Image (cartoon, rainbow, N blue to C red):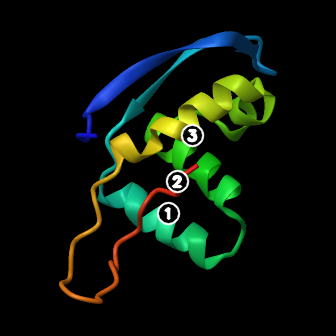
Amino acid sequence: MNAQLSNTFALRYPVKLSDGTTVAEVTLTRAKGKALRKLMQIREGGGDDFEHSVAMLMLISDQPEELFDEMDGDDLLMLIEVIPDFFPAPPTTGEGGEASSPTAPTS
């Protein structure tokens, strides 16, 4: 799929945050260098693909961790599925080469 600049996704189950606000949609924006650097730091710190996916969502949505902690599983999985659309494709390095840039995990 082609990378998108931004897209807004309606939540099937809106989330009420501790400050009283209700989040009914999440806008994801294409990852920039700052987000990629933070993602590399997060990956170096360990964790599994699911934790990395939630971290990526926080980086490209500018939403608090609380939202994803309280989000319905169907909504969270829907957002995780579209993460690759907002990250650059890894560079190709030729035969047998490994990509060295961070990539979104596949679900």
Find residue 103 and report its horizontal and vertical position in percent: 41, 62
Q: How many residues crowd mark 1 within 10 Å: few (<14), some (14–19), many (20+)?
A: many
Q: Is residue 18 above or below residue 87?
A: above
Q: How many residues crowd mark 2 within 10 Å: few (<14), some (14–19), many (20+)?
A: few
Amino acid on which disc 1 is placed: Leu
Which mark is first along the chain, 3 or 1? 1
Residue 95 left/right relative to 71: left
Which mark is first along the chain, 2 or 1? 1
Disc 1 is placed on an element classified as helix
Give the residue pinned by disc 3.
80
- Alpha carbons under labels 1 and 3: distance apart: 15 Å
Disc 3 is placed on an element classified as helix
- Alpha carbons under labels 1 and 2: distance apart: 15 Å
Amino acid on which disc 2 is placed: Thr
Give the residue pinned by disc 2.
106
Find residue 95 and report its horizontal and vertical position in percent: 21, 88
Q: Is residue 71 above or below residue 107?
A: above
- Alpha carbons under labels 3 and 2: distance apart: 8 Å
Residue shown at the point (70%, 34%) measured from the top left = 68
Q: Is residue 83 above or below residue 101?
A: above
Amino acid on which disc 3 is placed: Ile
Q: How many residues crowd mark 3 within 10 Å: few (<14), some (14–19), many (20+)?
A: some
Whether pointer 3 and pointer 2 mark residues with C-beta atoms closer than 8 Å, the reply is no
Asked whether 40 or 99 is in front, the reply is 99
Give the residue pinned by disc 1.
39
Quarter of the image for residue 49 reads bottom right
